[in-house]
Image: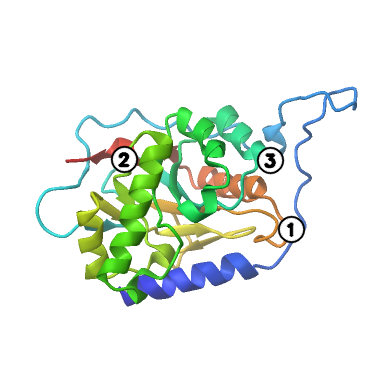
């Protein structure tokens, strides 16, 4: 647990304090006449035109959740498919261009939303959900869960379950503890609130790089990757769309496809 706690704290520090480097120009969204006419961004400028297609979802789901015992905590899926799973946390940033990117590239994601960050515009995430992507639980206020008592942890998880279910019409089945910090009390609170799995990660996006659990900086079959709905205010002036593109390029270079996490899970 302490390894994961340290990794969560380091990931947050690196994300907020990463070094800025020169990057490619953003794809143009202006029409050929330059008069503001809408045009689709040219994602090929970022090397995103050749993403590897994911295999069909397995009929026999390799990760089985629910049942008796503590809620399962996992950071990867036991699969031999050459796939990774992209998860996106929080919800501060609501960049319309990012919605276009997901529509154009059809990259599946799982959204772990913090209610306090999304309640000013619940509607932003609905077009992303309409692409087949799932809304999952990331607390009401983004606290360190292990610093809360049992009642406080239940309030954070159950309150978000009610809010997200009301807004998006589906009950979250997965939970991500902020900063990757959890305890047995978190597992118990998650179970009481209807959560079937607690999702951590093996690699996370930084402003212009990735942080890996693997000291060799390699991805592996079934890895869960962490990104954030964060924008220039949190990313030293960089856009979420650019950071996401950098992550996709690293996934492609290592020969992986992006699959949908929930397609590999059997829920109770």
Q: Residue at 68% across / 50% down in the picture?
A: 239
How many other residues sit within 10 Å of disc 2, few (<14), some (14-19) or many (≥20)?
A: some
Front residue (pair 74, 134): 134
Location of mark 1 (residue): 237
Front residue (pair 137, 59): 137
Quarter of the image with the C terminus in it: top left
User: Which of pointers 2 and 3 lies earlier in the amino acid sequence?
Assistant: 3
Location of mark 2 (residue): 171
Callout 1–callout 2 Cβ contact below 8 Å: no
Identify the element where label 1 is drawn: loop
Location of mark 3 (residue): 46
User: On the picture, is 208 further left or further right than 131?
Assistant: right
Image position, residue 15 (x, y; %)? 58, 65
Identify the element where label 2 is drawn: loop
Q: Which-is-in-front pick, marks 1 and 2? A: 2
Front residue (pair 250, 59): 59
Q: Residue at 20% across / 55% down in the picture?
A: 192
Q: Which-is-in-front pick, marks 3 and 1? A: 1
Image-quadrant location for residue 234 = bottom right
Q: Residue at 38% across / 39% down in the picture?
A: 166
Find the distance from the CA under tag 1 to the CA under tag 2.
Answer: 35 Å
């Amino acid at each position: 647990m302490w390894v994961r706690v340290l990794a969560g704290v380091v990931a947050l520090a690196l994300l907020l304090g990463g070094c800025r480097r020169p990057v490619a120009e953003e794809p143009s969204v202006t029409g050929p006449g330059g008069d503001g006419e809408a045009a689709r961004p040219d994602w090929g400028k970022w090397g995103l035109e050749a993403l590897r297609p994911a295999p069909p979802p397995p009929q026999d789901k390799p990760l089985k959740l629910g049942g008796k015992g503590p809620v399962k905590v996992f950071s990867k899926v036991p699969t031999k498919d050459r796939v990774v799973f992209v998860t996106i946390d929080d919800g501060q940033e609501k960049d319309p261009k990012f919605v276009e990117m997901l529509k154009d590239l059809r990259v599946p994601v799982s959204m772990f939303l913090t209610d306090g960050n999304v309640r000013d515009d619940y509607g932003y995430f609905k077009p992303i959900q309409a692409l087949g992507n799932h809304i999952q639980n990331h607390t009401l206020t983004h606290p360190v869960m292990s610093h809360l008592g049992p009642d406080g942890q239940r309030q954070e998880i159950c309150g978000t379950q009610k809010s997200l279910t009301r807004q998006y019409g589906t009950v979250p089945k997965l939970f991500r503890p902020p900063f990757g910090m959890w305890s047995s009390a978190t597992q118990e609170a998650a179970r009481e609130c209807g959560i079937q799995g607690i999702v951590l990660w093996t690699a996370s996006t930084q402003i212009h790089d990735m942080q890996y659990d693997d000291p060799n900086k390699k991805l592996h079959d079934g890895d869960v990757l962490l990104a954030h709905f964060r924008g220039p205010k949190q990313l030293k002036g960089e856009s979420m769309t650019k950071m996401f593109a950098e992550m996709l390029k690293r996934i492609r270079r290592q020969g992986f496809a992006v699959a949908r996490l929930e397609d590999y899970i059997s829920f109770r």
